Image: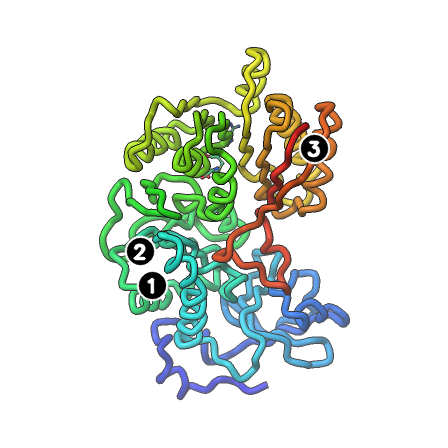
Amino acid sequence: MAKITNLIVIKSPFYRIPFYYLCSMIDVVLKKGKEKAALQRHPWIFSGAIDKVKGTPVNGEVVKAYAADQTFLAYGYYNNQSRVAIRLLEWEEDQIINKEWYHQKIKNAIAARAHVLNHQDTDTCRLVFSEADYLPGLIVDKYADFLSLQILSAGMENAKAEIIEILREELNPLGIFDKSDANARTHENLEVSQGLLWGENPPEFVEVKENGVRYQINIADGQKSGFYCDQRDNREILAAYTKGKNVLDCFSYSGGFTLNSLKVGAAHVTSVDSSALALETLSHNLGLNGFDTAQQTSIQSDVNKQLRIFKEEGRKFDIIVLDPPKYAPSRSALDRAARAYKDLNRLGMLLLESGGLLATYSCSGAVDLETFKQIIAWAALDAGKEVQIIKQFHQPEDHPVRISFPEGEYLKGLLVRVL
Ligand code: SAH
C-alpha cells in the first residue's frame, strides 16, 4: 500500500489543500464479509462495516478502503460524523483523486446532458447528480447562464475551490451560487452555506426555458435549488392529455404542470400551493408565456384542506395532478408517509369526473414503485373506485439511476384512469 510522496505534493494542483491530505493516504479496513456492496460498486460504506482505521483521517479526507483480506476496494471520502462513514469515489487503484480526476468526472456528467440541452428548447437541467455521476455530495443545476451548487458531503466541501474552477473552465457561467442549505449537510456535520461563490449575483428572477415553456427562477429564495427540473419530462407527457380539459394542479410550485397544460389548450387550470412565493412566481410565469389569466386560478392553501373544500362544494375535475413534497424522508417514516399518500390520493380520486385522470407522484426514495402502486390500490379501495394504470412516470435522464446505487431512484409516478 504505497504512500504518496512529498514530490507529488509539490506538483499537485491541490497545493492549497493541507499537506496531510496528500502525504499520508490512510487505509480503512472493513470487517470480514462487509466488502460485498463496495465490490458491487455501491458507493456507501456504513460506520458499522469498518474494522480498523489506520490513522486519524480528518472528515472529508480521501482514504483507501480495503476488504478484511487486504484486497483494495475503492477510494472514498471519510467522515466519522456520518452514518455513511465512507462515500466511495473511485474503484481503480491507479487513479489519483486530484483536480484532473474531478475535471474528468464533471466533464463526463456535463457531456451526458447534451441531449437534454440540445433537443428540447431547454436551458435548465441538473448537470451533476451526486453519486449517480460518481461525485458523492455534489449537485450542480444549470439555470440558463447561472449555476446553482449544492455541496452535501465533507469531502466535496474540501474540493469546492477546484470544483468552481472546473465549472468556470467548462461552462463559463455568469455566476455560481451556493445553495447548500439542504438537511443532508447536517448528517455530515456541515453548516448551512448559501451565497455567491463566483461571478455575478443572479438577479432576483433568472429566466429559463424548459420544453419551450418560460419560467422565472428565484435561485436564492426558491425551493430546492430553485426549480423542480426533475418533472421536465412528466410535465410534457401529462400535458398531452389536457387539451380542452378542466385541470387541478395540486402542489403547483411555480406552475410546471399548470403552464404545460395551458400551452396545449387546457380549458382551465386551478393551481393549489401553500407557498405565496411559489404562486407569485407562477403568476409571473403566466405573463411571461402570454397565457390567458382567465383560464387559470391560483389558490394559496393546504392541499388536503382544499381538496376537502372542493368535495363539500361538489367540484369535479377532468385531470388532477398530485405532486406533493417528500412525505418519507427515510424508511422509518414509511408507514406514516404511506397513510398520508393514501389519504391524499383517495381525496383526489373522489374529485374526478368518471373516467378522469389522476397523475400522482412520489419523490420519496423510501417509497418504491411497487409500494406506491400498493398505496394507490388502497386509496382506490377506500374511495370505492376502480382504477387503471395507463402510464408510469420516472425521473428524467439528467437524474440518472446508477444500477449499483438503487437509492438514487426517488421520483416515480402513475397516470391512472379513475372509473
Ligand atoms: N409540481 C411542482 C413541484 C412541486 S414541489 C412543479 O412542477 O414544479 C412541492 C410543492 O408543494 C411546493 O411548492 C410546496 O410549497 C408545496 N407544498 C408543500 N406542502 C404543501 C401543502 N400541505 N399544501 C399545499 N402545498 C404544499
Q: Quadrant of residue 166?
A: bottom left
Sequence-earlier tag: 1 or 2: 1
Q: Mark 1 points at which residue?
A: 164
Q: What element carries label 3?
A: strand
Q: Name the residue under label 3.
A: 387
Q: Residue at x 42, y 29 (%)?
A: 275
> Is disc 1 in contact with disc 2, using a CB cutoff of under 8 Å?
yes
Q: Quadrant of the N terminus?
A: bottom right
Residue nearest the observer in this picture, 376 or 179: 376
Q: Classify mark 1 as within 8 Å of ligand 1 or not, answering yes or no.
A: no
Q: Please, which residue is most extreme toward the left here?
A: 200
Is residue 118 among what the camera can see? yes
Q: Residue 176 carries which label?
A: 2
Is residue 217 among what the camera can see? no
Q: Position of residue 370 (x, y in %)?
A: 71, 46
3D distance between C-alphas at marks 1 and 3: 49 Å
The residue type indicated by label 2 comes to Ile
In the rendered image, the vertical position of residue 186 relative to residue 40, given as above or below? above
The residue type indicated by label 1 comes to Ile
Residue nearest the observer in this picture, 148 or 262: 262
The residue type indicated by label 3 comes to Val
Q: Where is residue 68 in the image (x, y as percent from the top left)?
A: 72, 76
Q: Quadrant of residue 361?
A: top right
Callout 3: few (<14), some (14-19), or many (20+) C-alpha neighbours within 10 Å? many
> Is disc 1 in contact with disc 3, using a CB cutoff of under 8 Å?
no
Query: As drawn, is 299 to the left or to the right of 34?
Result: left
Q: Residue at x 49, y 48 (%)?
A: 233
> Is disc 2 in contact with disc 3, using a CB cutoff of under 8 Å?
no
Callout 1: few (<14), some (14-19), or many (20+) C-alpha neighbours within 10 Å? some
Q: Quadrant of the C terminus?
A: top right
3D distance between C-alphas at marks 2 and 3: 46 Å
